[in-house]
Amino acid sequence: MLRDVSVRELPTGERLRIVKHRFMPIGLDEAEVSYLPRACVITGMHGDELEGQYVIYELVRRLQSQSQNLAGVIDVYPAVNPMGMGAIERGIPQFDLDMDRIFPGSHDASPFEAMAADLVEDVRGAQVAFDLHASSIFLRELPQIRVNEESAERLLPLAQQANVDYVWVHESAVVLKGTFAYSMNRLGVPTLVVKAGAGMRITPEVGEQLAIGILSVLVQAGVWTGPLPLVRSPLVGTDDMVGYLHAEVAGMFVPCISFGREVRQGQVVGRIFDCGSATVLQELRSPVDGLLFTLREYPLVYPGNLIARVLGGASC
Amino acid sequence: MLEEHILSLELPYRDPLDVRAFTFGIDARGKALGKGGDASTLERSLCVVAGIRGDEILQTLVCALLVEQLERMERSKALVPGRLIRVIPCANPTSMGIGRRFWPLDKTDINRSFPGSPGGETTQRIAAGLFEQVRGFVYGVHLSSFYLEGDFIPHVRVMQGPGERGNHGSDFCLPYVTHYEPGSFDTTTLHYNWRRCGTEAYSFYTRKTTVADEGIASEAVRSLLRFMGARGLTCKRFHGGSRSFELAERALVPVHVPVGGVCCPVVRVGDVVGKGQLLATIRDLLCGHVTARVVAPCNGVVFYHARTPLVNERTLAFQIVPDDADEVTPPLA
């Protein structure tokens, strides 16, 4: 069942819509399901992040084929920034601010801030919510959940059921108070931020992995009753357990090891070349032993660009 | 005048980022910077920054004209000895050079990257390098632009909250000084971090952004000189300007359009309007019919007008300063 969450008219007469697909237990009507637990899965906040599309494809495929297992309501929002997605832009075209920094939104400012407010209002009251992101076009990430330390106690048990490789408990930053997840968590909706894969790409195995993870959490939330395979146990890390590798020069980065594997401290992760002179400008070595969970995807680099993140530390 | 290369960053297949600063001052011996003057004996009094975003052309022009003016004043000993003034006309020449508002590779906004990190991502490194050069001043003025495209009555914004320690915004003698509470996304701006570190910061909004209009720029330069004169940085006071009306930004009355279409305004910023007065008509883009009339919700003055000719339903088309807005009493240091 397709519904409008927020609608604004564009100058051309086109309607800018945030929509959701609603899945309900068979035989029940709207009034009857209003007492049931509800889960929300949103994606497409950043228009150039497409991994969430395949996650919801895999999720919805299962919801449709096993609808007898629905014990509550599942709302799936496939593109909360439809203009960005259509224009292959991370942000909202015609608007300077990152959509994931304007929550809880406002009806006093731009139409886009009003749409953010509409989205918050629609998700409010859910038992659990997911905000699915890919990485940017520059990086590839192992499937992971990022949890603000302020919400860690409540979210960690859910995140550990979500079939991800890694749960990153990060420090609270004031600027993150504008995120969808922060607003929803403040409103009492446990909201998990999932990050996986790369921008402008779909990685089918990531989609399958995360769809199973979402269903696993929905079982905990009492929304889904279907059988599931065993989910993986994620590593749980904090900021101080992450080692960073940055480019210190401008050039072309080429990795020399595969992504998502264990690396040793000092092991060469990749090199930056000046191609015209066939010169190696920088050799990048892992700062710690650990799991290479982020790796540069886009070859051209400026000084400072992130090349890799390695999860190290004794408790991993 | 000292012309310094304060920040450099290597770029792939382009000349490096090269941020230049122009520093003025006369030491106790009467020697100007660059002519034997000793900068270490001067108070870091004022820093003016523009062009953090690559489309802030007018803001950069304002600084360029200010540099020209200060050079003359320094030569004629019209600057008060012991005061150092630094102007950075274009903090992001890499984006400006290719007509991009944000950083060319990842489209990040340097003015959302402060205080930056010397070991972080590219724009965090730029922000950190820039902040190192602009911190520690008594006064900081950032010639900025708004996140929504549009024209403003010239004004300065003063942030409330962390680090707020004084307000002499009315010394610019612009028509308005607005006070705002920072949102979470404001915490990474230059203004916020200046205030956090003890600099009395102002965001200065010119009438326009992406144009090179010498008339508007000269008005802004005169306003900056009035501020300098009032704060004791120049030997003479500069006349003209307005008595500023200070108000809370939340007192501005938003006017949204009810439908999408072509917005045909009939008023301009600065116009005095009465409640019910027509501000704009919205026409259907394809048929030309007038689909909505946008009217003033109150008596007041048009403060902001969206620049875009095509509007979406609920676009913020105008902001009005209502006649009955309360005047804010500025906290003084």
Image (cartoon, coloured by chain):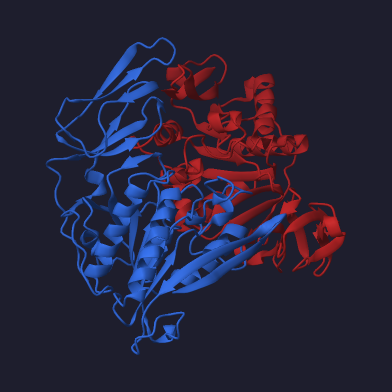
Chain colours: A red, B blue
Image height check: is B2 above or below A186?
A: below
Q: Position of residue B162 (x, y in %)?
A: 34, 64
Q: Give the residue at x 51% y 58%.
A: B113
Residue sitting at the far bottom: B29
Q: Position of residue B164 (x, y in %)?
A: 29, 65
* Closer to the camera in the image, A80 or B315: B315
* Closer to the camera in the image, A128 or B141: B141
Q: Position of residue A77 (x, y in %)?
A: 55, 29
Do we see residue B181 in this rendering?
A: no
Does A290 sit left or right of A30 as displayed? right
Does A169 sit left or right of B288 as displayed? right
Does B52 sit left or right of B225 as displayed? right
Q: Quadrant of the C terminus of chain B?
A: bottom left
Total marks in image? 0
* Closer to the camera in the image, B115 or B323: B323
Q: Quadrant of the N terminus of chain B?
A: bottom left
* Closer to the camera in the image, B279 or B181: B279
Q: Position of residue A238 (x, y in %)?
A: 61, 62
Image height check: is B30 above or below A37?
A: below
Residue sitting at the far left: B324
Do we see residue B195 in this rendering?
A: yes
Corner quadrant of residue B328 = bottom left
Image height check: is A5 above or below B283?
A: below
